[in-house]
Amino acid sequence: MLVSRRTQLYDFHVRNGHMVEFAGFEMPLWYQGIVPECKAVRNSVGIFDVSHMGRVLISGEGSTAFLDYVTTNDVAALEVGRAHYSVMCNEKGGIIDDIVLNRLAEKRYLMVFNAGNREKDLAWLKMKAERFSVEIQHISDEVSMFAVQGPNAQRVLEEICNEDLSQIPRFGGRYVDLDGVKATVTRTGYTGEDGFEVFTWDSPIEKPSRAVTVWNAILDHGKSSHIQPCGLGARDVLRLEAGMCLYGSDITELTTPLQARLSFVVKLTKNEFIGRDALAREKAEGVKKVRVGLKVLEAGIPRAEYDILKDSQVLGKVTSGSFSPTTNQGIAMGYVPREYSKIGENMEIRVRVKNLRAAITSFPFYDTSKYGWQRTQA
Amino acid sequence: MKINDYEVPEGLYYTKEHEWVKLEGSSCRIGVSDYAQKSLHEVVFVDLPKVGAKIVRSQSLGSVESVKAVADVFAPISGEITEINVKLVDSPELVNQQPYGDGWIAVVKPSNLEAEIKNLLDARGYADFLKTQIK
């Protein structure tokens, strides 16, 4: 029998949320509803339990060289106390997973990857680590992980934190005390908003008290900001609005980071890394298909797997689609041949029996003067 | 009557796909049930049929959609669409607020009501069916 896994916050989710199974975990899809939860994050603050995500500590003499070999971004250039987005590729340049790598110390890293890839990534890392002097410690079930996201995230967290969080830059992080509990906070997230991810150390699933303490403290102190616990539904919509990829849908082992428009994390000039030759070749030959954003210009909602057309010719498929509560329209991502990928290009999306007019749009989908992390710094 | 949290008004006919039918003289008003709207949760879009469209029993005439989900609306009876609820264009949430009232979807002039009505459930029959759907 396949038993669904739970996080440290399972009791809270069951009491307050509408539960679904996701990547083998029993998780909340929503509490109040996807729309109010998205609005809370865009306008104030929301909190997500993302303890289902995979987390490993990678340490040892060879850790930097190893990570530079298995990931595409420049790990040697990552400063201690900073994080970066990256991908792991196979030899063909296909994406094994997208990750966030935090450099906790000179030779100690925290890698965060997708829940659905926990076993695959762990096996991949262990296999590729053989010739490096590294230790890989799987801590997904020992450390809880929450995301506190939105323009008021810092204000809420600061009330229970012993440190000045305004000193943490985007993609920076540090060790702190949160309501007396040891935690690491990083200025990262998957919503496009300013916000933090909170790792509560020593809070295993069998003994979740520290995780629950931190979660409840954030909810309590967020009351005046109308903090909203948010489920996986809002998480998926918010990341799509921000133009961020979902592994398994928008990126897979059959797509390369160049096709996915993630070339900013591919450092072809660094030392040998897995997938480099294939990616260098693809770059030289020209990328054939690319990931684009599509906004629907009439009423209707695109969904994954719907065809993308131009002049009645099918050019590609939607990989993620949804109604956007922030822009109040249908939005999507998908792949089209590079020659059709210009911003403003008119396309159609076949929604069941009819075609919707759509236009290729830059990411994020929302107005960055009103929403997203950049506006909070204005 | 009420089954768990779900309203099942008497006097309407229902399908196992959770549409309702209300006889209004020679016409039928149709919509989706309280169970259907609660399952979808937040309705953000209703894909309405066109007035004049011919619909065939059990075939999709449109959809009711939440942020993450699409539910087809299947024609409970065959006929021609004579009216659609244009209020749903700007206020799809009416399906959540009043599934049997202002959240109706269309009015149909039936073409074969006498024969097809036998396929529909009355409130008691639908309530019994709902019980089998709810764990």
Image (cartoon, coloured by chain):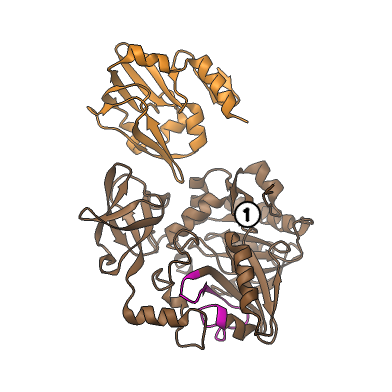
Chain colours: A brown, B orange
Amino acid type for the residue under numbered disc 1: Gly
The chain ID associated with circle 1 is: A
In the rendered image of this protein, does residue B38 appear above or below residue A91? above
- Looking at the rendered image, the quarter that the C terminus of chain B falls into is top right
Who's the residue at 56% across and 83% down the image?
Answer: A68
Please name whichever residue, B53 or A196, is drawn nearer the observer in this view of the structure.
B53
Q: Which residues are magenta?
A: A69-95
In the rendered image of this protein, does residue B42 appear above or below residue B4? below
In the rendered image of this protein, does residue B59 appear above or below residue A30? above
Please name whichever residue, A75 or A127, is drawn nearer the observer in this view of the structure.
A127
- Residue A14 at what x, y percent from top left? 67, 43
Residue A40 appears in view: no
Residue A57 appears in view: yes
- Looking at the rendered image, the quarter that the N terminus of chain B falls into is top right
- Is residue A129 rendered magenta in the image? no
Who's the residue at 49% across and 87% down the image?
Answer: A270
Tell me the residue that label 1 is attached to.
A222
The part of the image, by quadrant, that contains residue A178 is: bottom right
| Secondary structure, magenta segment, majority class | loop
Who's the residue at 46% across and 17% down the image?
Answer: B121
